[in-house]
Image (tube, rainbow, N blue to C red):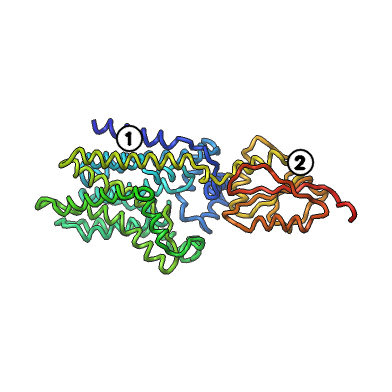
Amino acid sequence: MEGLLLLLITCLAGALRTLELTGRGLNLDEGFSAFLAQTPVPKFWGLIWLSELNMALYYALLRLWTGFGHGEFVIRSFSVLLATATMPVVYLLGTRLFDSRTGLIAALLLALHPFHFVLSQSARSYALVILMACLASLFFLRGLDHPSAGNWTAYALFAAGAVYSHFFAALVIVAHGVSLLFTRRRRVPWKWLAMAWSLLTLLLLPVVVFLLRHRDAANVAWVAPLSLEQARYVLYSLTLSKYRWLAYAAAWMLAGWYTFRRPVGQSAWPFWFTACWLLLPPAITIAGSLLQPILVERYLAVCIPAAVLLAGDGIARLAQRRLAVALGLLLVILFYSASNIRFYLRQAEFDENWREATAFVLAGAQPGDEVVIMEGLPRVVFDYYRLTSTTTVRGLIIAGSADAQLPNPAPENVWFMGSIRLKPHWEDEAHRFLEIHRQDYCSVTPKLAPGPIKVWQFKHCGPRPGT
């Protein structure tokens, strides 16, 4: 029966995450993932070592996955697959830490977890790092219960895989170590632990060298200074938005309450292990943000499994005493989770509309036209949609600023594309072009749907009368 329920939960998670999978176009970060997936091998590894080691494992696996195709659905479905595979692993974690009922509840909570849903539909490494962190945690527990070379080697490999999926996974490894302070086991397999951590250190030496050579490689200069608002968003990302997070908090408190009122001889370590996983990474990140702002909710997505495990434990323990109340709390969390997912799917504001903006320009462009677009990620996303579009514009010229010299003969249209979120002053760049070329070009108001990506069109209208 439990196997059937787990299968249903896993299928629910997978089916849910395919809803509106291509309803929004790729954002800048996803466009970069697609770019790396198609980059020639020598350039790919060069970029990885120079600046992108943080998500190296994801990029490498995505390259293999895109053998099935390079469309939006294919690229994002890799994350859907990884996220769906996480459900059985969370069930196994819950069963090993607590019991099978807790495992099923935790898997169900994860299946409808709003932020996990959002990350599951993104062509980024977050679904992978969550899965790797869960697998590392599972083999950590297996290694403690059944010390063997296989279990501890698997732990080291999955822990290293988690770090190569995202550097913040290292905080989960720290939580593993700290959790041992709360164990009352008569015999902790320190020899095996030393072996596993030695192997893990060896596997992570390239990360150490990378960070020492590229001290700005974390690329967090854009992160805002530490604030209560940031901390609130982290809390929402691990639970539910606004006041709804209190439902998760109630389940967590129940887990703690029943743990401290446990019968004599019953271990509290499973609670402390999960609590360390949930609380230590945010605490360390907040402390680190006092020196360098690094608090970003998606970076701490590795704590989502701990959030649902601890909540599952609280609900399962309550069910042993007050079944109706436990079911009510579970249904409240599931209802709010589903409503949050529904809200996300219906909000167009989450779309950066690069796909629509690119299609608009290509539909209106003539052979030899020029497109001026910001260098870097915007250019990458534009090229992705330009190259995958069924609309081909011969001789389209791409430039990076208003100062770029116009080709000869002058293009019929010059198009400016830019994100007012990424660079609010990009509109000034478009107006500067018109100031420079006012004798030859006139402004045309394009009819593009509202969104953060704006398009400005300047049409060649020849010399003005009287000049």
- Residue projecting furthest to the right: 466
> From mark 2 to mark 1, how far is it between C-alphas?
52 Å
Q: Is residue 448 above or below residue 405?
A: above
Q: Is residue 138 left or right of residue 216?
A: left
Residue 23 visible in the current orientation: yes
- Check disc 2 and report its element: helix, strand or loop: loop
- Check disc 1 and report its element: helix, strand or loop: helix
In depth, the one of 413 and 172 nearer the eye is 413
Q: Look at the numbered discs 2 and 1 and tell me whether their residues touch, using CB distance below 8 Å.
A: no
Of the residues shown, which amino acid type is indicated by label 1? Ile
**Image location (x, y in percent) of residue 102:** 24, 42
- Which of the two discs, 2 and 1, labels the residue nearer the N terminus? 1
| The C terminus - image quarter | bottom right
- Write the residue at 63% across / 37% down: 389
- Write the residue at 32% across / 35% down: 9
**Image location (x, y in percent) of residue 143:** 24, 50
Residue under numbered circle 1? 9
Q: Quadrant of residue 127?
A: top left
- Residue projecting furthest to the left: 264
Q: Is residue 147 left or right of residue 399?
A: left
Of the residues shown, which amino acid type is indicated by label 2? Pro
- Residue projecting furthest to the bottom: 291
Q: Is residue 328 above or below residue 188?
A: above
Residue under numbered circle 2? 367
Residue 157 visible in the current orientation: no
Q: Residues within 10 Å of mark 1 (few under 14, many from 20)?
A: many
Q: Is residue 319 left or right of residue 166?
A: left
Q: Is residue 98 left or right of residue 394?
A: left
| The N terminus - image quarter | top left
**Image location (x, y in percent) of residue 418:** 63, 51
**Image location (x, y in percent) of residue 335:** 34, 39
In depth, the one of 435 and 65 nearer the eye is 435
